[in-house]
Image (cartoon, helix red, strand yellow):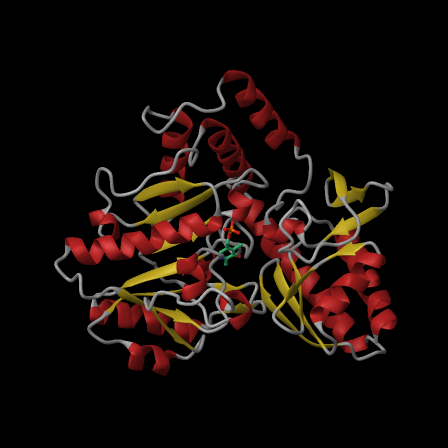
């Protein structure tokens, strides 16, 4: 058996160096990075401000413990609260831990308000919330669940964007409704405006918490700081990760004061979550994202890329692409071959993308891409289509 547990389908090459929107393998082959490590490297590779922040903190203190005050954590939490719907923040090391904290917020809310029987959560079909036992129990994706039964009966999975099914699934055991604002791994599918507003309304009427997983779509990916801001609603709890650490392991659970009523002394914790190194990077990421004009730039670039992709889909001689979808710079190309096959062929053309669902090629470029990078990507997508079409 390999010394690395063989759970990933890895490419045969190894990436060892990055510069802006490009990464290089051990043979110094160059790849245009339109996967960004699955939406993590949102500011490209080797961003000077991020390098500086991590380097400076690494000379002062790596870790102490949450037994003590952590100034960087207080600052980052305050800035996240100021920038979002939330009043309070818990820092984790990963996305699934942020999501797990969101789930604990739900349970603790219902305990604290005398409704412990509302122990279940409504989630959506094709969801991806991570790989813990609770997170795989929360989805109906068989490829994530297979081999791990019995899984806890804590969730009721309904079809995504199907408001009627959500309403029907609400009973005395339900405490929250939880889904990705834009489904990523499941196929790059944004929530519809009707669904988002309808679910908010159902939550208000039944006094349920609305919990959004913005681990992939949050932190400027859609052109707003958090993705739900595109929908004009306010959630009760949101999980973020990926781009907030830009490659340093960091996640966060954001909640309103009302939702977090049960998260009292001793209710939760993490040894390295929110440590000085992670907080230095998180604060540096916010310096970039909260700079006036940054979000507007993402909106502009995403409109331009989407036009170019639509043009590609319309003119590609192999008829490879049947639809362009997504939100902001989280885009999907529906194609007529299995997405894994396309992604692999694109790598051979020097373009990194990620598969989503069965037949969607996911594009998550760094948010700092320029028009020439978009043109290069479209050119490589066209060549890839010829290769596999
Ligand atoms: C990546 C991701 C997760 C899991 O994050 P990890 O850091 O891998 O634990 C959860 N939800 C969504 C939507 C994601 O994209």
Q: 95 above or below 199?
A: above
Q: Quadrant for residue 329, please give it.
A: bottom right
Residue 203 as seen in the image, left or right of residue 144? left
* Residue placed most toward the observer, 241 or 151: 151
Residue 59 as seen in the image, left or right of residue 108? right
Residue occupying image coordinates x 23% and y 76%: 171
Image quarter hosting the C terminus: bottom right
Residue 352 screen position, x and y as percent: 74, 55
Q: 196 above or below 69?
A: below
* Residue placed most toward the observer, 11 or 217: 11
Q: Residue furthest left?
A: 114
Q: Is residue 230 visible?
A: yes
Q: Quadrant for residue 197, please give it.
A: bottom left
Q: Residue furthest front?
A: 1
Q: Is residue 180 visible?
A: no
Q: Quadrant for residue 172, please give it.
A: bottom left
User: How many circles with numbers are drawn on the protein?
Assistant: 0
Q: 140 above or below 371?
A: below
Residue occupying image coordinates x 22% and y 55%: 109
Residue 103 as seen in the image, left or right of residue 242? left
Residue 111 screen position, x and y as percent: 17, 56
Residue 366 as seen in the image, left or right of residue 91? right
Residue occupying image coordinates x 45% and y 52%: 96
Residue 101 screen position, x and y as percent: 35, 49
Residue 65 screen position, x and y as percent: 38, 26
């Amino acid at each position: 058996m390999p010394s690395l547990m063989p759970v990933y389908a890895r490419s045969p090459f190894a990436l060892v160096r990055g510069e802006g929107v490009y990464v290089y393998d051990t043979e110094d082959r160059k790849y245009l990075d339109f996967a960004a490590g699955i939406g993590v490297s949102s500011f490209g590779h080797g961003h000077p401000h991020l390098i500086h922040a991590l380097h400076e903190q690494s000379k002062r203190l790596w870790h102490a413990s949450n037994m003590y005050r952590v100034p960087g954590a207080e600052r980052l939490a305050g800035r996240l609260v100021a920038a979002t719907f939330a009043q309070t923040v818990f820092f984790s090391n990963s996305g699934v831990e942020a999501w797990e904290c969101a789930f604990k917020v739900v349970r603790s809310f219902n305990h604290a308000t005398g409704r412990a029987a509302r122990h279940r959560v409504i989630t959506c079909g094709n969801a991806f919330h991570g790989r813990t036992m609770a997170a795989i129990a929360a989805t109906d994706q068989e490829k994530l669940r297979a081999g791990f039964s019995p899984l806890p009966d804590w969730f009721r999975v309904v079809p995504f964007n199907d408001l009627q099914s959500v309403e029907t699934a609400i009973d005395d055991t339900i405490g929250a409704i939880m889904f990705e604002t834009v489904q990523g791994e499941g196929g790059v599918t944004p929530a519809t405006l009707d669904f988002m507003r309808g679910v908010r309304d159902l939550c208000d009427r039944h006094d349920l918490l609305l919990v959004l997983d913005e681990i992939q779509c949050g932190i400027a990916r859609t052109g707003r700081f958090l993705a739900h801001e595109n929908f004009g609603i306010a959630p009760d709890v949101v999980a973020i990760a990926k781009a907030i650490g830009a490659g340093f392991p960091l996640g966060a659970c954001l909640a309103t004061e009302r939702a977090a009523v049960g998260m009292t002394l001793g209710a939760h914790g993490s040894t390295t979550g929110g440590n000085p190194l992670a907080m230095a990077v998180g604060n540096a990421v916010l310096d970039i994202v909260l700079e006036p004009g940054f979000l507007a730039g993402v909106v502009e670039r995403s409109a331009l890329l989407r036009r170019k992709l639509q043009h590609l889909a319309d003119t590609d001689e192999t008829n490879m692409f049947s639809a362009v979808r997504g939100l902001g710079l989280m885009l999907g190309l529906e194609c007529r071959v299995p997405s894994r096959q396309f992604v692999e062929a694109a790598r051979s053309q020097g373009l990194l993308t990620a598969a989503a669902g069965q037949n969607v090629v996911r594009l998550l470029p760094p948010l700092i891409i320029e028009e020439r990078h978009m043109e290069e990507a479209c050119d490589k997508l066209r060549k890839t289509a010829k290769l596999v079409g």
